[in-house]
Every structure is written in C-alpha cells, then in structure tokens.
Image (tube, rainbow, N blue to C red):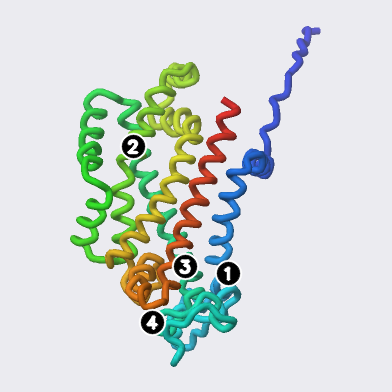
Amino acid sequence: MAAIEQTTRIPAPARPSRWARVRATFGILARSRTAMVGLALVSFWVIVALFADTCLFTPACWVGGDDYQATPLLARYSPLQQFSGASLQGPSAEHWLGTDRLGRDLWARLAHGARIILLLAPISVGMALLIGGTLGLLAGYYGGLIDESVMRVLDALMAFPQILLYLVIIAALGPSALNVVLAITIAGAPGIARLVRSLTLDIKTRDYVAAAQTRGESPWYIMFVEILPNARGPILIDAMLRVGYAVFAIGTLGFLGLGLPPPSPDWGSIVNAGRKFIQAGHPWDALWASAATAMLVVGLNLLADGLQEELGRYR
C-alpha cells in the first residue's frame, strides 16, 4: 500500500467583518474628544439636511409637480414661502430665527441650505479626489517624463489663488450648481495630486510592492490594490479638511453672487442679502448663516484633527 502523507494545514486567520471594521473605526473616534465634538457638530447639520422635510421618504418630492406640498419635519415652512407682513422680523415662537426681507422663514432657509452645502461639497471633493488621486498615482509610480509633465501642469494651476480660479471659472461658465462643483474640483485636484504623489513615492519602495512586481502584477493592480489602500489614512484626513474648505468656498461664491442663483437658500447668498440690514437693526440673516457656516467648517476640522491624532498613535 502506498504511504499516505498527511499534512497539517494551519487555517488562515478570518478577516474581520465589515461591521467589525466599522465598529473599530468608531472606536478610534470615540477615544478622541476633539473628534467627538466635531462629529456632533457635523451630525447636527446632516440630520437637519436629511429631515428638514419628508422628501427622504416621499418620492413625489424628487419628482416635483404642481401638486407638490411640503411636509416639514424639522423646518415647519418651505424655504420659499413668503409670509405677508412678516418682513425682517426677529426670532419668535412663530419663526424661530426670524424672517428675511421677503418674509421667508430663516430657519427653513438654513435647513434646506444645509442640504445644498452637504451635497455639493462632498461631490466636489470626491471628484477632485478621483482626478487628483489618479494623476498623483501615475506621476509617483512611473516618474520620469510622466511625472514632470503632470506635475508642471498642476503647478501652473496651483500658481493661481484659489478664489481667483473660482472667479475665472464661474465668470466664464455662469453661476450654477454644476459650475460651482466644477470650479472646486479644478482648484482642489492639484493639491490632492501632490499629496498622493508624495505618498506613492514612499510606498512604492516597500517590500510588498516589490513582491507584487516580482509576481508580474500589472502597474494598475499595484497602484490601486497595493499602494492606494496603504495611503488611505492621510488621503481621507486631507479629504475631510477639503470638504470644510469646499463649504467655505461655496459660501464665498454665494456671497459674491457667483453661487447658486436665487431663490436658492444658499448660505452665502443669505449673508449677502442680510448684510444690508445689519445697520438697520436686523442682523439675523447674516448672523445665523455665518454661524451655520462656521459651525459646519469647525466641526469638519475638529473631526479631521481628532482622527489624525488617534491614527498617529498606531504608527
């Protein structure tokens, strides 16, 4: 009889489930008071944006039509509803934060404006991450002529002040939500590309990248499977900070009249319209919209700082 050799196989360690990884991430956040304060500030506006009305549960809100009626949850009125004889009122039980010059409820406009801000800012940063991250990976991995060509073009874009670049793009294309996203994407992609390039230059010298090259893996596999996941920490923290910058940029463009066209409840346009009435004894428009912008930007910055501090403990 032939001898049968028995080998003992050591089972591979089980990978943690997705829920376990999510709990581990929130556990890191919970250990930082700075991150928790920032998370609370950001979560407040996320909840307000989601539940300012019942559009989250009512498909008719997204379809629109003549029979559409707002059914608010957190904001009792439509942001476009005008109350006769209620122009420029201060905070009251009827209008929690007061009304603007057209008699529109300021809290309703802030609540629905948060939906615009929290939609456009992450989309802008996400597109900048996609473009800048890809260019940074290519430049850092291949080097040589590709690196020089890509980075010199991006350096030329970075030579312009960002606000000037916003103004040029919006003035050329016109104010709209799409053009605001495009302007922030173009202005933010070079900085992301430089960050990803520097991380790629460091990571591509590691042993596991050399092992992947020895196995004959393609450059795209090495860049997006071996290099990019190991650079995600600094990239995510930078992206979180850039969302705060994008919120501020959207408000700045709205204040300059280059953001979303009226009667959109853009926070920047609310400040611009309300600043004319500050000396008349009605500071509420500018005050509340400025405070909302500051609260959201500070919350994002605190969240990024706290996350960076905690992740640094594991290096």
Q: Is residue 176 visible?
A: yes
Q: Upstream in the sequence, badge 3 or badge 1?
A: 1
Q: Crowdedness of circle 1 by 10 Å Cα count: few (<14), some, many (20+)?
A: some
Q: CA distance from mark 1 to mark 4?
A: 26 Å
Q: CA distance from mark 2 to mark 1?
A: 36 Å
In the rendering, at what x and y percent does residue 158 appear? 25, 41
Q: Nearer the viewer, residue 300 or 169?
A: 300
Q: Upstream in the sequence, badge 2 or badge 3?
A: 2
In the rendering, at what x and y percent does residue 30 appear? 66, 43
Q: Quadrant of the N terminus?
A: top right
Q: Upstream in the sequence, badge 2 or badge 1?
A: 1
Q: Is residue 68 above or below residue 41?
A: below
Asked if disc 4 and disc 3 are in contact, CB closer than 8 Å, the reply is no
Label 3 element class: helix
User: Three-letter amino acid code at disc 4?
Assistant: Arg
Q: CA distance from mark 4 to mark 3?
A: 15 Å
Mark on residue 288? 3
Q: Is residue 235 above or below residue 71?
A: above
Mark on residue 51? 1
**Residue of label 4:** 101
Q: CA distance from mark 4 to mark 2?
A: 44 Å
**Residue of label 2:** 193
Q: Crowdedness of circle 2 by 10 Å Cα count: few (<14), some, many (20+)?
A: many
User: Three-letter amino acid code at disc 1?
Assistant: Phe
